[in-house]
Structures are given as structure tokens and as C-alpha cells.
Image (tube, rainbow, N blue to C red):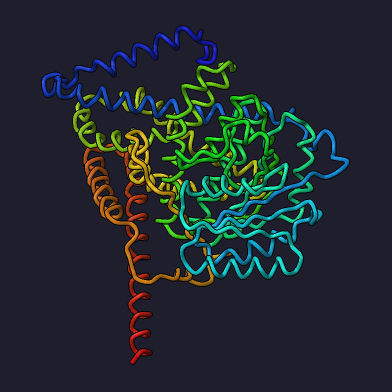
């Protein structure tokens, strides 16, 4: 009889016996037996690893849903077209965007739409030279006949949500498109999105982001891969299967009555886009995702800028979960919709769990050294496959679906992507804890510099009155964590636990990369400031 003909129940019994032997292996009973202290380490460790594994399984479910609906996805064309085009307002929220605002206005004034039906609102909360510069630009375009309205607030009440809310007071459009300052508005954006609103139940049309500087450096390439996972797999999977998905804060167009009917822009979270999205969908409004329409944008080029952006999203989404999850769970919605909303709104809770799990890895390795290698294969391996292999397969699959010709490079980039993910654990953990404790913080802008293409020149220094470090304690804590993981690598090698070394090295690389690249950039900024100050003193003399 060959192995393939052995009944499944016999294999199951054999596997169970091996598992019991591994769990209760008494080979080293005379040397070490588990005591209460060991259990206080092992029980929390495996409990948290199990939760992380469940979130990993959700990635597999997203991939499966995407694949299952791919061939029977909804039509990418609107069912009907407007006989007479409606009025549209394009809102452009700004805050100290000196480097990109000129490009933004130049492109938005090229949009293919009748001028008499278009209103362009520049909502400027800037406190630096962006304000007078942008006001002059808007006046120039208005003199040329473009429907550009300039609004400047002297306070940032409500941050971006507050600016959008204030803009609606004078908005004339039945539909409102929103674009962040670092985006390039496609000329045919309105012509390719407005006709979906012939269906009166549609509240939002969201389009896909693309990236002007995707190949600027390793960091921007990794960010492109991370965002592709969201825009290629998650958005399509949720939209095709009829689940809720979110407006991404930009590159989308809303029905004005849907905004008002859902309570308007609220500014008690840092992700006002997700907040309004879920409130609208709970009330019965439907969203459309059109990935064929690509809106170019700019990715952060420095590590700390990337970390700050991700931590803002992590905190904001957790705030939305605290605010709306009970409302969603109590609503008359299908169970699958509620479950997907839980997965969507709470993934950042894994960052504190990751910190605690990894902090326990060294003592857990010491405790388990005498407990047999079988446990690593029968217990740890399935959990790690569910957690980490889901990340690898998820982002490789996203790259394959984005571009089947060049997806193989994503395999080479996987260690860099995992290291970048590790670099987010500390700052995102802080963000999640602040959200859980109800600690309010300001909306921190992600600096953009109108960089396109590959890296040719250094990032231009932002104008500033004085030098100021941005990252504070973060890089030093990352150095401590990186060193801690390096100690774990040494211990794992000494214990012949080579199975754990690749995973540990990802955290070593991630923490050191984040810390050293941030400190290096800030050192360069300081030198540039000191040089500029010296030149100012010499000129004054």
C-alpha cells in the first residue's frame, strides 16, 4: 500500500499522537519542567500569536475572494450616461504644500469638463509662504477665466475634515471631488467617473492611486507594493463581493446629498474618509470602485515621513473602529459584511500584539530550549505560516495582478517589504494606544516635494525658520529594539535554532534601517540649516 492510499483518519491519528508527544515530551523532565513562571510566558505568547495568525488568515480570505469573483466582476462601465452634465465642485485641501501646489493647479485647470459647470475650491490652511504664493496663483488662473475659488482659514479647526466641511458651505456642485495636494488630476477624471451617478443609490466613486516616484528609492518601491495590496486586492475583493470599502481621502468623487445625509464631515478621528465611508454605507448608500482610472500621486521619500503617514492612518482607523464598530454590528447588515468591517477597521491592533509577542521571544526561546524541536514544527510553524507567509503571498499576488510581466521582482523585494513593516511596529503601536486611550493629536502633514521618476537629486530641503528634530525619541527606541533582536539572533544560533534566525533578522534590519536612515536625514538637515544660517550671517555683515 502506498502512502497516498492511507486513509485520512489514520494520518490524522498519527499527527495527533506526534503533537501530544511534542507537547508533553518528558525527555528533559529531569532537567527542566514547566512551572508557573514558564506558563505566564507561554500562554500570553501563544495567545497573541494565535490572534496574529487569525489576521493572517484574513489575508488568505481576501485573496480567495478576489480570485473567486475575478471572472464575474461587475461591469467597469456605468449603466447609463447623463444627457446633461451636472455641476461639479473639485476640492483641493492644502496645508504648507509649497512644492506641489503649482503642479496641482496647473493640472486641475486642464480637466475636461464645461467651465460653466465646474467649480475648483482651493482650501488653504497654510501657515507658511504657501498661503500668499497660492493666493497669487489662484488670482492668475481666475483672471484667465478658470473657475478657481481661493479659501484661506486662519485656524486648522478640524484639520482636513474641517477644511472640506467649510468648503461645502460655498460649494455649488451636486457632486464633490477631492484631491490632495500631491496628486495629479487626470484630464478625463470627471468624464470617466461622473456617469456612475446616474444610479441614484451611488454615493461615491473611488479611483486607484498610481505613483509618480515609485522607483525613486527602495522605500518608495516598498510603499508602492504595500498600497497595491490595498488598491488591487482589498478594494476589488470587497467591492466585487458586495462588502463595505472606504473612500481613500482623495482621488474620489462624492454625491453631495450623500455627504449631508450621512452626517457630513466629522473631525473626531484622523481618518475622516473612512469615518464618512462607513456612516454612509450603514445608511444604505453604495460605493463604486473604478481601478481603471489611475490618479498619479507622490510617495514619501524619507523614512520618518513614511512612518508618520502610516501612524496617522493606524490611529485614525482605530478611532473609527472605536466610534462605529458597535453601530455597524447592531445594524441590519449581513454577517459577512459585519465580519469584514471588523477585519478592515481593527488590523492595527496587531501592532501592540506584535511588540509584546516579539518582546517575549527571547525568554520563550530560553524556556522552550529543553522542550524538543517537534513543537517548533507542529505548533510554531502553522502559526507562522498563517501570520508571515500570508503577508508574503498577499503582496506577491497583488504585484502579479497589477502587472503579470514584472511581478517576479516582488519576490526579491519581500525581505525589504517585511523589514519596512517591522519599522512601523513602534510608532504604530504608540498610535493605536493613543487611540484606545482617547488621546487627541493633530493631523500631521506628510511632506511632499514634487519628486518624480528615479532618484537623481537629493530631496530638497523644506523652507524653515530654524532647525528642529522631527523624530524625537523614536529612532533611539528603534536602535534599542534592533539590538535586542540582534541578541536574540546570537542566542538562536548558539541554540542551533536556525529556524528562527530569518524572522529575527527581518526585525533587526527593519529597526536599524528606520533608526539610522532617520538620524542620517536629520543630521543632513541640520548641516543644511547651519550652512544656510552661516550664509545669512555673512550676508548681513
Occupied quadrant, residue 15: top left
Occupied quadrant, residue 230: top right
Does residue 19 show up? yes
Does residue 214 show up? no
Relative horizontal placement of residue 19, taking residue 181 as reference (left or right): left
Please state the horizontal and vertical placement of residue 301, each as a whole percent of the image. 48, 60
> Observer-nearest residue: 383 or 274?
274
Which quadrant does the C terminus fall into? bottom left
The residue positioned farthest toward the bottom in the image shown = 541
> Observer-nearest residue: 275 or 509?
275
Residue 490 higher or lower than 436, as above or below: below
Q: Name the residue located 48 percent from the left edge and 70 percent from the top edge.
A: 460
Q: Name the residue located 56 percent from the left edge and 30 percent from the top edge.
A: 278
Q: Name the residue located 62 percent from the left edge and 51 percent from the top edge.
A: 179
The residue positioned farthest toward the left in the image shown = 30
Q: What is the total number of numbered labels drawn onto the structure image?
A: 0
> Observer-nearest residue: 90 or 80?
90
Occupied quadrant, residue 79: top right
Relative horizontal placement of residue 492, taking residue 283 as reference (left or right): left
Residue 135 higher or lower than 16, as above or below: below
The residue positioned farthest toward the right in the image shown = 83
Please state the horizontal and vertical placement of residue 223, each as a whole percent of the image. 51, 50
Relative horizontal placement of residue 433, taking residue 134 as reference (left or right): left
> Observer-nearest residue: 286 or 426?
286
Please state the horizontal and vertical placement of residue 438, each as a whole percent of the image. 35, 35
Please state the horizontal and vertical placement of residue 265, each as a whole percent of the image. 55, 39
Amino acid at each position: 500500500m502506498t502512502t497516498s492510499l492511507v486513509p485520512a483518519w489514520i494520518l490524522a491519528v498519527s499527527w495527533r499522537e506526534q503533537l501530544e508527544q511534542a507537547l508533553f515530551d518528558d525527555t528533559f523532565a529531569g532537567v527542566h519542567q514547566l512551572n508557573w513562571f514558564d506558563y505566564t510566558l507561554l500562554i500570553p505568547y501563544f495567545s497573541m500569536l494565535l490572534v496574529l495568525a487569525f489576521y493572517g488568515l484574513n489575508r488568505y480570505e481576501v485573496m480567495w475572494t478576489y480570485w473567486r469573483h475575478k471572472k464575474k466582476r461587475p461591469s467597469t462601465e456605468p449603466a447609463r450616461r447623463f444627457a446633461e452634465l451636472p455641476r461639479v465642485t473639485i476640492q483641493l485641501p492644502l496645508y504648507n504644500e509649497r512644492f506641489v501646489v503649482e503642479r496641482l493647479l496647473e493640472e486641475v485647470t486642464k480637466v475636461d469638463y464645461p467651465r460653466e459647470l465646474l467649480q475648483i475650491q482651493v482650501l488653504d490652511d497654510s501657515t507658511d509662504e504657501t498661503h500668499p504664493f497660492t493666493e497669487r496663483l489662484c488670482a492668475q488662473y481666475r483672471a484667465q477665466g478658470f473657475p478657481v475659488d481661493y479659501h484661506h482659514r486662519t485656524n486648522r479647526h478640524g484639520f482636513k475634515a474641517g477644511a472640506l466641511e467649510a468648503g461645502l458651505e460655498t460649494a455649488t456642485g451636486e457632486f464633490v471631488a477631492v484631491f490632495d495636494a500631491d496628486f495629479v488630476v487626470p484630464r478625463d477624471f470627471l468624464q470617466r467617473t461622473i456617469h456612475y451617478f446616474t444610479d441614484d443609490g451611488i454615493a461615491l466613486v473611488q479611483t486607484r492611486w498610481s505613483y509618480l516616484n515609485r522607483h525613486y528609492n527602495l522605500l518608495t518601491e516598498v510603499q508602492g507594493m504595500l498600497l497595491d495590496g490595498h488598491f488591487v486586492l482589498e478594494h476589488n475583493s470587497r467591492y466585487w463581493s458586495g462588502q463595505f470599502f472606504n473612500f481613500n481621502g482623495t482621488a474620489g468623487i462624492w454625491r453631495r446629498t450623500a455627504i449631508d445625509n450621512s452626517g457630513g464631515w466629522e473631525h473626531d478621528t484622523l481618518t475622516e474618509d473612512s469615518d464618512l465611508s462607513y456612516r454612509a454605507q450603514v445608511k444604505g448608500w453604495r460605493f463604486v470602485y473604478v481601478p481603471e482610472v489611475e490618479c498619479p500621486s507622490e510617495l514619501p521619500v524619507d523614512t520618518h515621513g513614511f512612518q508618520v503617514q502610516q501612524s496617522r492612518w493606524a490611529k485614525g482607523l482605530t478611532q473609527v473602529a472605536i466610534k462605529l464598530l458597535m453601530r455597524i454590528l447592531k445594524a441590519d447588515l449581513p454577517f459577512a459584511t459585519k465580519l469584514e468591517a471588523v477585519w478592515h477597521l481593527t488590523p492595527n491592533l496587531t501592532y501592540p500584539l506584535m511588540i509584546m509577542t516579539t518582546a517575549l521571544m527571547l525568554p520563550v526561546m530560553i524556556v522552550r530550549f529543553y522542550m524538543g524541536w517537534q513543537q517548533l514544527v507542529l505548533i510554531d510553524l502553522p502559526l507562522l505560516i498563517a501570520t508571515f507567509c500570508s503577508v508574503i503571498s498577499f503582496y506577491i499576488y497583488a504585484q502579479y495582478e497589477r502587472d503579470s510581466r514584472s511581478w517576479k521582482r516582488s519576490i526579491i523585494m519581500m525581505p525589504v517589504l517585511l523589514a519596512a513593516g517591522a519599522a512601523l511596529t513602534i510608532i504604530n503601536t504608540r498610535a493605536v494606544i493613543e487611540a484606545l486611550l482617547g488621546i487627541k493629536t493633530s493631523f500631521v502633514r506628510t511632506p511632499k516635494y514634487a519628486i518624480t521618476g528615479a532618484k537623481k537629486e537629493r530631496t530638497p530641503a523644506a523652507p524653515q525658520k530654524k532647525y528642529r528634530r522631527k523624530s524625537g525619541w523614536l529612532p533611539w527606541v528603534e536602535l534599542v529594539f534592533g539590538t535586542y533582536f540582534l541578541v536574540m539572533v546570537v542566542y538562536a544560533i548558539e541554540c542551533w535554532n536556525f529556524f528562527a534566525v530569518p524572522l529575527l533578522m527581518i526585525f533587526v534590519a527593519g529597526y536599524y534601517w528606520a533608526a539610522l536612515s532617520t538620524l542620517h536625514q536629520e543630521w543632513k538637515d541640520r548641516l543644511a540649516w547651519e550652512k544656510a544660517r552661516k550664509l545669512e550671517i555673512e550676508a548681513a555683515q
